[in-house]
Image (spheres, rainbow, N blue to C red):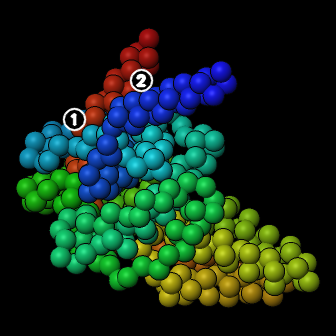
Amino acid sequence: MKTVRSAIIAAVVLISGVASAAQAPAAAPWEEQMRSMLYLIMNLSSINVINGINLTRDQALALRELAKKVEAVSPPAPDLRASLRPDLGEVRDTYVELRGTLLAGKEVGDGMEKRIMLARSVEAAVIRLAADGAQPSDKGCLRCHGAPEAADVRGLANTKAALEKDLAPRPEGKEAFVSHETGLIGYQGLALLAILTPQVDAILTPEQRVAFESFACCLVPPKSMTDPIRIGQAASGEKEIGILRWVRGVPEDRWPASKAWALDLWKAGLTIKSPGLTEAEKAKACDRISKIYDETRALSDVDFELDKTRLADQLHEVTAPTQTKSDGLRKFSAAMFLIGNGTVEAYDRLIERLDATTKQAAK
């Protein structure tokens, strides 16, 4: 009886498994999965810009009309509900949740920020795996990001192993910049965006233009993009100074091990921030950080208080380098973030909030 019962249970389990497998949707083509990730990163960055540079209602209306023109000639946005490989699916879901928060004009809490950082580390790990499958003869995203191995990179050990993979040389700088944007809005969209760039620049105030001199993609919004501290007059902040105070506080006998641990942490962080960095580039950055740490520990208490901002600036520059753009590139960057990357909805929601604020003030 037990044998028959066991056989029946096994058959039910097997049939259920087959049914579940049949119902599970197939993952989208790899290039579409990559495009979804790129779209979300660029779209989130655009929303952060639109929310962060204190646009007036008239400015938002004017920029929305230009964004509609670019959207009309661009390929459709990727389907953000499509089936992705499991690790990227979780990343996508986290980014989509963040997108809803930003579109609503709400603040990103500490808990969400930590989940975003974790999602970004998983995404960076998959990107490094994907580089192994790239073929120079491929086009589009597949040129640099071929289909990766099937290994799921969720979990600390798997993510760490993927992030430590070496990358072959890939396009960088202007070539990579254009490739990414073309992959999102197509050649027609890119051409129209370039044509409309002077109009975007004319809509902005001088203070708003300055924000684009060094702005790069960001998932979590800066506190204020138009704050002089944010746009370069003082690059360092309490975070960097806090790190330097920790460096000074480690006892001498524990410093070698603590320094090695800290540099390994920086190396991992650099990889997550920029998955395409070579080992040589990361080693160079860590060498600079090491020298900053050594100088920090050598100073007297008085000299450290006098020099802490300079040292924090140097640390910030290594870990988040500021590349001041030429005037032409600044203008194009502003146009890319403000009227590309599916920005129409961001303007719709911003205008709704501005109108609600005006009505509330009138009461």
Can the viewer see residue 279 in this picture? Answer: yes
Instruction: Tell me which amino acid carries mark 1.
Output: Leu
What is the x, y in percent for residue 326?
A: 28, 74
Instruction: Tell me which amino acid carries mark 2.
Output: Thr
- Quarter assignment of residue 129: bottom left
Q: Residue furthest top?
A: 363
Which residue is at a point 26% across and 52% down the rendered structure image? 29
Can the viewer see residue 328 in this picture? Answer: no
Which residue is at a point 66% across and 67% down the rendered structure image? 240
* Lower position in the chain sequence, tag 2 or tag 1: 1
Give the structural element (helix, strand or loop) at label 1. Answer: helix
Residue for badge 2: 357
Which residue is at a point 35% across and 31% down the rendered structure image? 23
- Quarter assignment of residue 186: bottom left
Left or right of 322 in this view: 347: left
**Distance between mark 2 and mark 1 Cα atoms:** 16 Å
Position of residue 111 relative to residue 279, above or below, is above
Q: How many numbered marks does the figure carry?
A: 2
Residue count near mark 2 (Cα–Cα under 10 Å), binned few <14, some 14–19, many ≥20: few
Give the structural element (helix, strand or loop) at label 2. Answer: helix
Left or right of 148 in this view: 200: left
The quadrant of the picture occupied by the C terminus is top left
Depth order, front residue of 198/131: 131
Which residue is at a point 27% across and 40% down the rendered structure image? 79
Depth order, front residue of 21/202: 21
Depth order, front residue of 56/111: 111
Residue count near mark 1 (Cα–Cα under 10 Å), binned few <14, some 14–19, many ≥20: some
What is the x, y in percent for residue 164?
A: 54, 74
Residue for badge 1: 61
The quadrant of the picture occupied by the N terminus is top right
What is the x, y in percent for residue 58?
A: 24, 35
